[in-house]
Image (cartoon, rainbow, N blue to C red):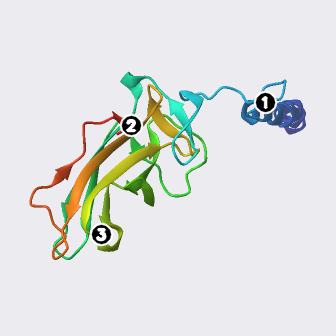
Amino acid sequence: MPMTSWIRRTPAALAVCVLLPLGVAGCTSGHAHDGADSPSPVGKVLDDTDETGRHLREVDRKDAPEVGVEVTPYLGGGWDVRLTFRHFHCSAPGAGRTAVTGRGLVHLLVDGREVTRLRTRAYRLPDRLVPQGTHHVTARLYADDGTVWAVRHKPVQSTADITASGAQTATAEPSTGTAAPVVGK
């Protein structure tokens, strides 16, 4: 009886060994039969890009991730940046390079220049990145594949304006970004 059981299992095991790799390869190739890229399962990648050259990933407004940004002076110097999210979670470091609905990372920009990439809701912005004067601190959402989350052809982002004085880096009131998702400011 053990011999019969072994004989019956062998063809089934061989079938799984032959068919499983074929099915997996067909599902993950990422290319259509004519060599063109298959459509993305998350939104639509547009030809439009942001100012850094990254393509926009258009999603419906009702499903779009949102971000809010609040910047306050830190007593020890610098600025505390706090982010709020809706329909969005930061991916863990080392996440795959695939766009997943509502996941990714945040690029933090000061006056349009990227200063860091975040996978967390908080960041301490050093004084050296915010010289005297008024500045725009922008949090922009990116998918893990490097595309920019977008609504109506504009990046999903939020911007807060801050003013740094010469003697003391401070604004009396916290600076809160415009309503999320801000598309384009």
For marks 1 and 2 on the same chain, the one whose residue lies earlier in the sequence: 1
Instruction: Identify whether 72 is placed above or below 56.
Output: below
Residue 185 occupies quadrant: top left
User: Tag 1, which secondary structure?
Assistant: helix
**Res. 184 mark:** 2
Gap between marks 3 and 1 measured at Cα:
53 Å
Which one is in front, 68 or 25?
68
For marks 3 and 1 on the same chain, the one whose residue lies earlier in the sequence: 1
Would you call the spot at circle 3 few (<14 residues within 10 Å), some (14-19), or many (20 or more)? some
The residue at the point 24 percent across, 52 percent down is: 161
User: Tag 3, which secondary structure?
Assistant: loop
Q: Mark 3 points at which residue?
A: 131
**Res. 115 mark:** none
Instruction: Identify whether 121 is placed above or below 101.
Output: below
Q: Mark 1 points at which residue?
A: 26
User: Tag 2, which secondary structure?
Assistant: loop
Residue 10 occupies quadrant: top right
Residue 20: x %, y % from top left: 79, 34
The residue at the point 57 percent across, 46 percent down is: 146
Gap between marks 1 and 2 measured at Cα:
38 Å
For marks 2 and 3 on the same chain, the one whose residue lies earlier in the sequence: 3
Would you call the spot at circle 2 few (<14 residues within 10 Å), some (14-19), or many (20 or more)? some
Which one is in front, 40 or 139?
139
